[in-house]
Image (cartoon, coloured by chain):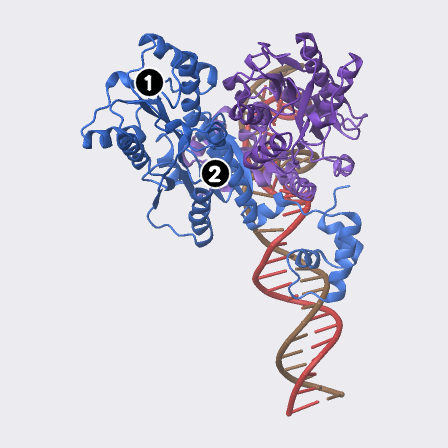
Chain colours: A purple, B blue, C red, D brown
Amino acid sequence: MKMTMKEIAKLANVSQSTVSRVINGNTGVNEESAKRVLDVIDKVGFIPNKAAQTLKRSHSHIIGVCITETYNPYFIELIDQLESQARKHGYNILLHNSNHNPIQEWESVQNFISRQVDGMIIVPTGDYNVERISKLSTPSVVITQNRKFLDSVGLDHALAGKIVAEKFIHSGHKSFGFIGTEPDDKYFGYRMALNENGMKLKEENYVQLEESSTNNILMRRDIESYLNQVGNIIDFTCAFAANDIMALEFINAAKDRGISVPEDLNIIGFDDTYLAKIMGISSIHQPIEEMVTTTFELLLNRMENEVSSKPVQIKLKPTLIERNSSNLVRVP
Amino acid sequence: MKMTMKEIAKLANVSQSTVSRVINGNTGVNEESAKRVLDVIDKVGFIPNKAAQTLKRSHSHIIGVCITETYNPYFIELIDQLESQARKHGYNILLHNSNHNPIQEWESVQNFISRQVDGMIIVPTGDYNVERISKLSTPSVVITQNRKFLDSVGLDHALAGKIVAEKFIHSGHKSFGFIGTEPDDKYFGYRMALNENGMKLKEENYVQLEESSTNNILMRRDIESYLNQVGNIIDFTCAFAANDIMALEFINAAKDRGISVPEDLNIIGFDDTYLAKIMGISSIHQPIEEMVTTTFELLLNRMENEVSSKPVQIKLKPTLIERNSSNLVRVP
DNA sequence: TAGAAATTTGTAAACGCTTAAAAATAATTG
DNA sequence: CAATTATTTTTAAGCGTTTACAAATTTCTA
């Protein structure tokens, strides 16, 4: 049932190379024999073997994608964009999930190489592998904040922190919180902007979640334990959460203890996923479509033009989408 | 920089076939030459070309996965399981999204074939392509309710409907609603169980959403328009929603009009995604991990044993996870 | 209408690997 | 130690394409 070009050739009474020519756009093949070939092809249903094509042409039209998790809906929107834009450019996606594990990430990269991917798009687990990835001959771009070794596209997280800080200050808040895992650019940008405005982010107002609490049960547990620790008294009237899930979980946990949002507490999330949209949570918008478009521009450029210029770092501007959770009602 | 076996062979002073043997598990190759080869390999960093392997061995160790959408978080958990279980079995995932479009779905299948995938896992757009897929020589299994032409694994949706109906009846409800797109097995199972218990699902209590409202803005709009149509008077005290997003959106829309859940209205969703978990929505649990495990059992069996027995249909049992949204408080 | 030019077709090598079969080498045995 | 047998290595063909090059056919030109 699985046909090869050779058999098509025989059936159509032409040589294999003619069949090949017909398939790849007809250059210099007579109308009539082309038609004969096409007829045979669609009668017997021939589909060319891309493994052979890849071997011969030495490119696969596959792009390897490695992300770090799927729990955060942000990644889903990313996958979605990646898949559809790749298709638009004639590429397929080989999808891997590193689960934040650098070893798994490196294995994925090796796998990509062995599959002769034409390019890689990686949401890195950290800085562990980026340098050696940059040494590879396969072009890659990284979706994240600045990485010096590779083309990268990401959001200006520090600016995001600043925007949130200023929004809170402007609303009249005086005490501030932060909800997240390890301190990152968002956090530093936020804190710095507060300082610049004569405000302070107190140590004890950092609701720190375990890096590994990548699933909601653990995340909620971390939040509960914070709230217990402070005796259910939240010292801040507004907080910036490192992603929408955290924002939502915190809102829920607070609500269970009689603290309501936005009346007693303002919250701004991050990513602007559909979670935020559905639940009316203010959030920093990540322009995912634009990020992916840019990613492909960089990648296709390297792939098609074999350029080996200095890596370029693209930082997109965050915007604050205001919804109900940061509507000052009576807080300060 | 990209090495081939030939070059490794030269560097290690052996023939190509020896290199090949070393790579594929050493059978009948002398310790010493094996070591020499291995040394060269890890010095120069050789990674075998899988396109060539695929061509020669005529299998790719790739499984093609085609889903219908990514908006519903259910699919994400599915992708996640699919990817990790595939990897566990030594396969990679080529991911496509048909966006509910049968034409795109068929293109994906063709693409899979041309890439010599060893198997396909498909969440079908409907019945459009299943028959011709079953005619292909590549084994496939479909994740959905019963399909006669292919191995399939899915939940017993009718039973899910029945479980929900009985739960509502048992709680003392007298008037029932349904929120979903087109009528499906869930709906029929729900309605039938109601009838069997002397209850009725009124036509006007079917909150019908557009099939295409696959993104939240449209879904919310459909709900709003239903509520406006009935003058904000909801005639039912409990409703079964075809997925968790619909459940959540309906709860939010109702809440905005002063109808609160579970006090005035009980809601049970479907899929038991993390949305339901985070928001405390009762939901019919889809045992995704088990579904995927079963899927791989079926697929690997066909792939490895080349069996061509009758397609088997596996129907898993749904379970109701009760949370706050169906806690009877004062409704009937 | 012969010869040149243009078009169409076919032949064969190559892409990087695996593997059956042949060849070379080493180990065993009477 | 020659003959067998067992082990290790190499040779070469082939997987299904693409493509440079040569060969054949058609079309044009004087």
Pointer 2 residue: A8
Q: Position of residue A107 (x, y in %)?
A: 67, 44
| Residue B206 visible in image | yes
Q: Quadrant of the N terminus of chain B?
A: top right
Q: Is residue B273 left or right of residue A297?
A: left
Give the camera-side residue of A21 and B317. B317
Could you tell me which residue is drawn at 56 percent across and 31 percent down? A21
Q: At label 2, which amino acid type do we have? A: Ile
Q: At label 1, which amino acid type do we have? A: Val
Q: Is residue B162 left or right of residue A106?
A: left
Pointer 1 residue: B207
Q: Which mark is residue B122?
A: none
Q: Residues within 10 Å of mark 1 (few under 14, many from 20)?
A: some
Q: Position of residue B282 (x, y in %)?
A: 40, 31
Among the 4 quarters of the image, the one containing residue A237: top right
Q: Secondary structure at mark 1?
A: strand
Could you tell me which residue is drawn at 80 percent across and 13 percent down? A196
Indicate whether B79 appears above or below A179: below
Chain to which the residue tagged by mark 1 belongs:
B
Q: Quadrant of the C terminus of chain B?
A: top left
Using the numbered discs, state the Cα–Cα distance from disc 2 to disc 1 in whole angstroms. Answer: 54 Å
Q: Is residue A114 left or right of residue B109?
A: right
Q: Secondary structure at mark 2?
A: helix
Give the camera-side residue of B109 and B294. B294
Give the camera-side residue of B165 and A4. B165
